Amino acid sequence: MKALEVREVSKMFPGNLANDRISFSVEKGEIFAIVGENGAGKTTLMNIIYGIYTPSAGTIFVNEKEVKIHSVEDAIRLRMGMVHQEFMLIPRFSVTENIVVGDEPRKGIFFDYTRAVREVRELSERVSLTVDAQATTGDLPVGIQQRVEILKVLRRGAEILIFDEPTAVLTPEETADLFVTMRKLQEEGKTILFISHKLKEVMEIADRIAVLRRGKLQGIVNKKDTNEEELARMMVGRNVVLEIPKLDVPVGDVAFACHDLHVKNSRGYEALKGVSFEVRGGEIVGVAGVQGNGQDELVNAMIGFSRPVSGSMELNRKSMHMVTTAQLRKEGMSYITEDRARRGLVMPYTVRDNAIMGQHLNKPFSRGLRMDYEKVAEFAEGKVKEYDIRPGDIYDTAGSLSGGNQQKLILARELSLPHNFLIASQPTRGLDVGATEFVYGKLLEEKKAGKAILLISLELSEILGLSDRILVMFDGHIVGETTPDKTTEEALGLLMLGVGIDRKVQS
Amino acid sequence: MNITQINVTIAQMLDYTTPILFAALCGVLSENSGVVNIGLDGIMRFGAFFGLLGAYFSHSPWVGLLLGIAVGCAVGALHAFITIRWNGDQTVSGVAVNVIALGLMTYLLEYIFSTTGYSPQLENYFGAQAYRVHLPFLAKIPLLGALSNLSVMIWLAFILTIVLHVLLYHTVLGLRMRTCGENPKAATTLGINVFRVRWFAVIAGAALAGIGGVALSTSSFSGFSDSMPNGIGFIGLAAMIFGKWTPFGAMGAALLFGTGQIVQSIIAVTGIAPNLAPGLTLILPYVLTLAVLAGFVGRSVAPAADGLPYYKEQR
């Protein structure tokens, strides 16, 4: 039986056809994946099915009956549930409150919290997804928070579950856990829609795969009859090189070095507990680790956002004690951030203005008190061409670009600043294959040009593919150093979790 | 200082606290659902004038109270219409309400009563002996004696504090309101109608501010003065922040600020620190609030989506 069918569904946003006559059907008990680049229209499509957006045209069938889904209430009534890309959880609420809100056990007008806790415990046991019902949600690790999301939709009797990029925020172990959960749900007869742009994961979990590109359905394939390369080609519309070539570049002088660096996080807790390493010209040093093991604090200290408690840093053999970010940049440091919205770009500003930020006070862009916007525009036009930033109008706001193009803009700016040391912090986070390929290419070009690169990433394949040396971070320490040819994803994964580490030896 | 003096001072303190508390409760209700209402000072002014108007012409403060609530709801609905229906900037809308209240009440005062500055005085008002809640059994007990003869409005403020606490933390509606204030998008995905919940919270909150105004002109005083509410709405907002957006927290803060208002009388009665400049004690609430905001006395964090318009189909 078809659990869900969409026929000729379109969604028009002002100036943008996000979904263009999309049709597909999903069998009951199937794991159906929808893949596509960022901005291909996957999330829009799901939001239509889930009643958050109203489609401009088309019909939807649930259990082979035509339905009109005007609101989320309608979708819930039709036994659909969505696990969103950004969690729809309230950090201050308890796990129980988050799970039951909107469908609360009650006594009259009162909220029956005791019964709610009991119901959540029963549910979590029944589907064997363990959570602490009374914990404050914001204190839980991301993987557990996602469990709360899944419990939330299950409690509402969902038969069709939509997972929107569920692995984007997970570690490899958490992803494996999630896939176990998804299989279990499938065995119970639930239908699952899995939205992703990670082809490896799609190939692992899905039964059938639909590919979207620029709002159009490119085709639906059986997992058995396809492979990653074919999917990538359908997604991007051309051949994609996912393999990263090995480059042998002579290693140069030490560009960056730190010694016994201790840094506190924003809550005053020492999150970096004595880290020492160096990065030389022409090499990429990868930092692997589960999120929240001191990487953010390391980066913040390196770019001058926070002051180390103790320890020293050197850039090009000059001490960088108590210097500002501006001085660091003058000394030759560039920084690619994973947080494009808050650190990388000023979203309401134009591409033109974002392109010169950081050198806006330098000639030729500024002369005395006056900006020379002609020169700025000329420079921005050049970069837009060189980096193929689309749609290509330098007067578009940065916020209107897709994630991949935003990242290209950041690269364009950071790599055009005079620099010999580059910090790349999760440079491909949230990017699709096409943009990821572009970023890898640029990093390798940098390496070839003899720049020193520190690559911080949660993606082990990225770390293994790009790095010359790998540092593994766990709980604020560097717990291991290795090279890609001497290790595997599994071995790294264990190290990242602190397995088999004698802490006394390390500290 | 004898017992009578102490009782009078406490009663006076509660009298000052009451309008601040109503204002703070308005803020708590509205902002927990995600709508900032800095227009509550203006809504209090509406409430104060219309409360007087109702009480004056009907000779019953109860009619004044009802009129004050009605006007509060109406002005609240205007704020809701601008900020929820049309996603207008909440601060701008609030300022507009304040400015409208300032001019319109002065005009109405002169137009209706042909006077400037002060309305005619009320004979039947909540502060009058006939409208007080008499609890003679408390009169002889030290400290509690202050509670033996209070205006019904004072009791109402404290009762509503409890009601609001129960509403926010023990009812389904309260949980949903807080969800809208923290993450309206999440609320939508759970099938909660964010707009309806916010409309309710803003209007109910505005009704509280309206009552606060009525308390000023018909309980603390026996008439409307053109300077009302004299910034009490803003002190109420400060109390809300100081109280970390919770009803009981706001109550504690309002009591503290109310005490700040009577320090002058305490000085006069007790003779302590006779040379302290009068203005200094009045800025106490603001200094405390700044201290809280700066994080000296424990952090106070607003609901995550407080003050943000909600667009359902935003990309």
Image (cartoon, helix red, strand yellow):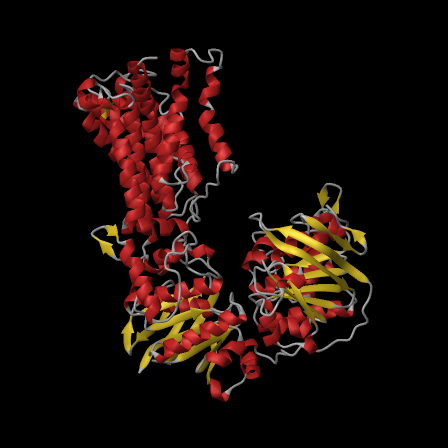
The residue depicted at 18 percent of the width and 21 percent of the height is: B136
In the picture shown, does residue B159 fall above or below B187? above
In this view, the residue in front, A393 or B195, is: B195
**Percent x, y of residue A273:** 64, 55
In this view, the residue in front, B289 or A445, is: B289
In the displayed structure, does residue A356 sit left or right of residue A184?
Answer: right
Q: Residue B46 is drawn in which quadrant?
A: top left
The residue depicted at 46 percent of the width and 20 percent of the height is: B281
Q: Quadrant of the N terminus of chain B?
A: top left
In the displayed structure, does residue B62 sit left or right of residue A84?
Answer: left
In this view, the residue in front, B135 or A30, is: B135
In this view, the residue in front, A479 or A25, is: A479
Is residue A3 in view from this perspective?
A: yes
In the picture shown, does residue A413 fall above or below B122? below
In the displayed structure, does residue B10 sit left or right of residue A303?
Answer: left
**Percent x, y of residue A218:** 49, 79
In the displayed structure, does residue A304 sit left or right of residue A134?
Answer: right
In the picture shown, does residue B141 fall above or below A45? above
**Percent x, y of residue A489:** 60, 75
Q: Residue furthest bottom?
A: A225
Q: Residue A200 is drawn in which quadrant?
A: bottom right
Is residue A56 in view from this perspective?
A: no
**Percent x, y of residue A431:** 57, 68
